[in-house]
Image (spheres, coloured by chain):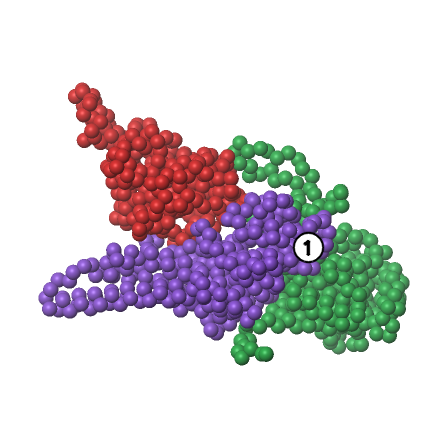
Chain colours: A red, B purple, C green
Amino acid sequence: MLVFAISDKGGTGRSVTSTNIAFRRALQGDDVCYLDFDFGSPTVGAIFGVRSAERGTERGGMHSYLQEKTEDPYRVDIWTDSDRSALRSRPPGAGQLILLPGDSSGGEFPASPRAVDRCVRLFSRLREEFDLCMVDLSAGRSYAADMVLAATARAELSDVPFRWLVFHRWTRQHIIAAAGLVFERRGLLDVGAAHGHDKTALAERIRFVRTAVVEANAPERSALRSTQLAWLDECDRDLHELARRHGVGRTAMLGKVPLDPVLQWREQILVDEDVYASQIANESTIRAFDHIATKIFDARAWEGL
Amino acid sequence: MLIMGEVQTGLLRNLGELGEPKCREVLGLVSGEEPRTSMRPLPYAISPEQFTGVDCRLPGVSGARIRGTGTVAQHAVIVGGRVLQASAYATVVAGAADHRLPWSHYLARPGDIEVHGRPRWADMAEGFMAAEMPMDALNLSAIGGRLMAAVQESPHLDGKTPFKSTRTHLRWVLWRGEAGAPPLLLTLGKGSLRTLRLTGEPATDVTAFCEDLALHDWLLTTIQAIIQRALIGTAAPSQIAARLAPAIDHLMHLWMPGARVPDSYQHLWKELERRPGFSRQWASSVTRIRDQIAVNTLSLLSAAVMTESGHEPDGDISPHRGASQDDP
Amino acid sequence: MTAPFAEDTAERRVEATPLSHVSIELGHLYMEDYAEGRDHLRERFRQVAPWARTVRESLSETLPGRARISTCFLIDDYFSRFGSPAEVVPMVTEAAAESGLVVDYLARESGCARFGPVDLATLVLDRIVVDPAPGANGSRPPLTETGWLCNGQRGPETAHVEAMGAQPGWRPPVQNAKRRHSIFVDVELWDAPGGERVWSCPFLAAVWQLLRLGLLRYHGKAVAVPEEPGETFPAEWDALPPLLKLNPRAAPFAAYRTVSVLSSRFLPVELAVRTILGQVAVDLEVLRQVTERARAEGVPFEDELVDRVSYVFT
């Protein structure tokens, strides 16, 4: 299974959420590979606490592989190579958790036909080994998104299931932007169709994930005055209406991740220790990750809208 | 003179076992050249030899920049219609000149790499065994990787694997060695890398031994991974049985160490059987798997008896298989 | 000790071919040469004759009484068609005979592309091992431009630069095995104007040299086995066997080395031919067979393919 993580705008928490989903999936027993396709800024290594690949690798990463400069893209085994001790022991029954970082100081490059060929080769190769490949794409309309849309339309990958997760914050601007990225001109559906995808089938493989959501029962709200609360509820209702109108409503949503200070201040993998021992993170956040990690593979969540 | 090589081993991308005629098609990588096949004691197919030109830095621990020019030989092997190997290797020899000669000179000696200047064999041999080589040094891994991809992308394969597995890389070197060096030293490195130091008179027929060893090391690695993931002792017997099934269906019959190794290298297998005892570990893994299957059968039987006598069975005997979730 | 068990498909058998000491090519003509008529042809062969004689004499001195020499002539029927075999073949052999030359073997250039059922050109293309540029360590596939082959590094690529990456400036192409200064050669092997692949003249000429050196095999069997001509020559080129043995007493077609007596207008073509031949990896077993036979016969023999090919340009 290929899962593409994308957002229209930066700062949605796309990378930190998708890495955490990948981590939960590995804990559940899947062999998981995380690919850094954020070509303009390949920094996922930092979230996994891998100092040697914080800003990508010098030893031939995704940029080099896709541009035919290396055949063996550099791999980081999170269970052994992370500098965070909490990640460094593989729990019994957990699957592999491998990071394929980008090149350090790599930049965006065009989705040439050769790069698409390489991308097809990479996905086919990883399929031999992994149950889940999570691909973290650059924000917005990017070469990376164009390339994977072209690759997944190819016959060689026709029987590889794939899903898209579009991350957005629960604000006016973000809702409109996320909808635009998917539905508008030169959006995912448009470009996908141009590469040979069936538009309806592709739409069924795209779901939205809301990030940094403040829930009605959230403890943060207890400090607010009643006028503020009333105002907030009204905003929330407006947002729901806006989301519905833009096709980003509840039915198209796969999950939501609550606002969590740890994710805001330090983008990192949340381990149980962060919730139960040091109590810096909220249990509900981990539950949200687990929920999304399960739902990605739950066929019912992906039935026609 | 020394020979260095790398064998990559992985599961062939095909759901079923590949028959001999298909193996011939898949390995027919050079027009007008037949792959060689044999059926005893195990189906086996090997592609014609191909060559890749290189002119680059050779590995070395001292950091000295040694340049070599020549060709790397490579071929692909399919064992049991199930396991694919790509083998890339080169014989490194003292050069005829310390500058680059016309390419036709090197093509008159396919499979040789000539060193510019004075070769430092020990330095080179150790450098090739290092986990991380300089990025500009000879990269047999990439050459083997491309060959592996060329086979895996064959239209004669259905592109799917019956279970997930990891490729292994066995990097090996054979040369006369320092005085008193053991005949062989196999090291399990980080991740999927294994290194093998062989001491002896360099001859390219050693590739058959290295490929055989790589195959059996991969079988052990893969069956161990399957056992580890089955969560024996924690999961329900039916789940364990389902997770162990690929080992029984696809791997167990492939164990035949030394089957295709020339007589002159059989003693090396004997060494490995003595320590660490490859076949010992294999036998114990196989026993463990069979025992688990037996336990599951027993629990199914007892459940059936209980149901007949009107009792509800304990434990989970649902036919749920822990198979891949790679289906849409 | 012999093995107690064997399987046929596990063994590799490579057929040996009979070999002469030298194969002499008696010139080469373009279609317009034929169009100019008999006199023009006679003049061409008159220029070839003394050189062919010299090659013959010098070899007879080194191998007195036992020199095996065969002659051959290649007719271009691949790029354009002129007349019919029934007209052209006798015209060629007669014009040669007037200068005292005997054409032992006559070949069609189409046969270098496809020889009967064998796709010879692809067979050779698959055996090209590209001359690596300094720094080539196997990480990247050989830098090839589809359908082209060169002896060095082309200038820089300008397309596909990463965002905010440095734009490469102009760099000259460089020969890999240069002697201080470069002679950079880039050869077009084929093109496909109408979708169908058309092999270039130098590529077919390289195949021709490999045939004359007896180095090509198809599934272990020798290719280009000469056929005896029928009573008359056919009216269509396609009906003519690709390699004909015109002289029944001729020494074997293939030889340890080749000499081609050519007009100097073919110099650029032959430079291209050598660029290609320098990058063909011949089957190891065939190389070994030929080398051992040459040694056993005591014939001077070159290891490198291109050194077995020589020319007289007139």
Residue A25 position, x and y percent, is 32, 46
| Residue A252, image quadrant | top left
Residue at horizontal 42 percent and vertical 55 percent from the top:
B166
Q: What element carries label 1?
A: strand
Residue A168 point in image, percent of width and height:
33, 33
Q: On the picture, is A25 further left or further right than C283?
A: left
Residue B219 place in picture, x, y as percent: 42, 62
User: Residue placed at 75% from the left, 77% from the top?
Assistant: C231
Of residues C233 and B234, the one nearer the viewer is B234
How many numbered circles does the render carry?
A: 1
Of C233 and C305, nearer the camera is C305
Give the position of the C terminus of chain A as an image quadrant: top left
Which residue lies most toward the left here?
B310
Q: Name the residue under label 1.
A: B94
Rendered location of residue B8, percent (x, y): 49, 57
Q: In this view, does B163 lie above or below C285?
A: above
Residue lying at 87% horizontally and 62% vertically, measured from the top left: C51
Residue at 71 percent across and 46 percent down: it is C175
Q: Which amino acid does label 1 sit on?
A: Ala
Q: Can residue C97 be seen in this view?
A: no
Using the rendered image of the protein, determine whether residue A228 is visible from the camera's viewpoint.
Answer: yes
Left-right relation of C90 to A111: right
Of residues B175 and C74, the one nearer the viewer is B175
The chain ID associated with circle 1 is: B
In depth, the one of B99 and C165 nearer the eye is B99
Task: Give the quarter of the image for residue C60.
Answer: bottom right
Q: Residues within 10 Å of mark 1 (few under 14, many from 20)?
A: some
